[in-house]
Image (cartoon, grey):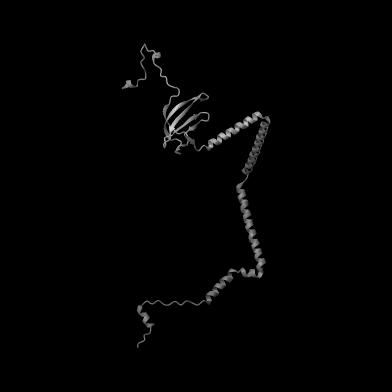
């Protein structure tokens, strides 16, 4: 069993590698590979939704006369899982992405479109600056002005943080408590002054009754009230016969 895993090969003395026939394959030969859908797409024939990551048995070929910086571009052929229509897409090494060619449309590519639009605008601005030196000077002036504004706002934030760092919060809370107490006392004094002004001194005396007067009134009320007579409890059931009179016809 150990001979089965031997890595060394035996070459006879008369071995000539030039005599081995070379396998000539066409350049556009297709290979069967197993892959996953690179993006969300929708079949244009039946409208079937194909999500990103769905597995397919695909045919792979090298795109002729197309490359990017020496990198080959490959094309893949898959079939719609519902109507079996052919869908083709190829690699895009320039953008590190894939391009759907036929049979389907790509979904959820709003972010990609926004990024492409931003890149196009940046390229247009760069080309305009190269052709128009006044535009370049204007853009640089705007950029320097924006940078100065950002530095000023940063300095303001730093000053504000330093001011907050020097604040004693305990002392602030104590001062606020004293202020609240003074405000409450002042409010009570204003209320008492308003009562004196509205009701007068005589009414004020009638309103402020002493505790002694209140106690005297309670004692008088107890004297005027009638005493409660409690009936004696009858211990024997025959005691009631002495209190009831019987009438005979």
Q: Residue 80: give x, y in percent of width and height.
A: 43, 35
Q: Residue 180: give x, y in percent of width and height.
A: 62, 55
Q: Residue at x 67, y 66 (%)?
A: 197
Nearest the viewer among 212 and 205 is 205
* Residue 188, quarter of the rendered image: bottom right
Q: Quick check: 160 left or right of 218?
A: right
The residue at the far top in this view is 14
Work out whether 74 lies above or below 175.
above
Work out whether 97 lies above or below 223.
above
Q: Residue 132: give x, y in percent of width and height.
A: 67, 30
Q: Residue 89: give x, y in percent of width and height.
A: 47, 31
Q: Residue at x 62, y 70 (%)?
A: 206
The residue at the far front in this view is 45
Quadrant (top left/top right/bottom left/bottom right) for the N terminus: top left
Q: Quick check: 111 left or right of 22?
A: right
Q: How many marks?
A: 0
* Residue 247, quarter of the rendered image: bottom left
The residue at the far left in this view is 1
Nearest the viewer among 198 and 206 is 198
Q: Residue at x 33, y 21 (%)?
A: 4
The residue at the far bottom in this view is 249
Work out whether 3 lies above or below 235.
above
Nearest the viewer among 8 and 198 is 8
Q: Residue at x 45, y 26 (%)?
A: 61
């Amino acid at each position: 069993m150990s001979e089965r895993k031997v890595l060394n090969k035996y070459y006879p003395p008369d071995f000539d590698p030039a005599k081995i026939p070379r396998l000539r394959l066409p350049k556009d030969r297709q290979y069967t590979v197993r892959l996953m859908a690179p993006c969300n797409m929708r079949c244009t024939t039946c409208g079937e939704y194909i999500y990103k990551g769905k597995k397919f048995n695909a045919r792979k070929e090298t795109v002729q006369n197309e490359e990017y910086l020496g990198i080959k571009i490959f094309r893949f052929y898959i079939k719609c899982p519902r109507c079996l229509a052919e869908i083709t897409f190829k690699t895009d090494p320039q953008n590190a992405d894939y391009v759907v060619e036929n049979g389907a449309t790509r979904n959820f590519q709003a972010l990609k479109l926004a990024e492409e639009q931003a890149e196009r605008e940046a390229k247009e601005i760069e080309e305009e600056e190269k052709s128009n030196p006044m535009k370049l000077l204007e853009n640089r002036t705007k950029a320097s002005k924006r940078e100065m504004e950002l530095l000023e706002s940063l300095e303001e934030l730093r000053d504000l943080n330093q001011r907050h760092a020097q604040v004693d919060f305990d002392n602030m809370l104590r001062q606020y408590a004293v202020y609240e107490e003074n405000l409450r006392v002042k409010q009570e004094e204003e209320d008492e002054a308003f009562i004196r002004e509205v009701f007068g001194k005589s009414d004020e005396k009638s309103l402020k009754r002493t505790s002694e007067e209140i106690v005297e009134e309670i004692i008088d009320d107890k004297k005027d009230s009638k005493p409660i007579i409690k009936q004696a409890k009858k211990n024997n059931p025959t005691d009631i016969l002495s209190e009831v009179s019987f009438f005979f016809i």
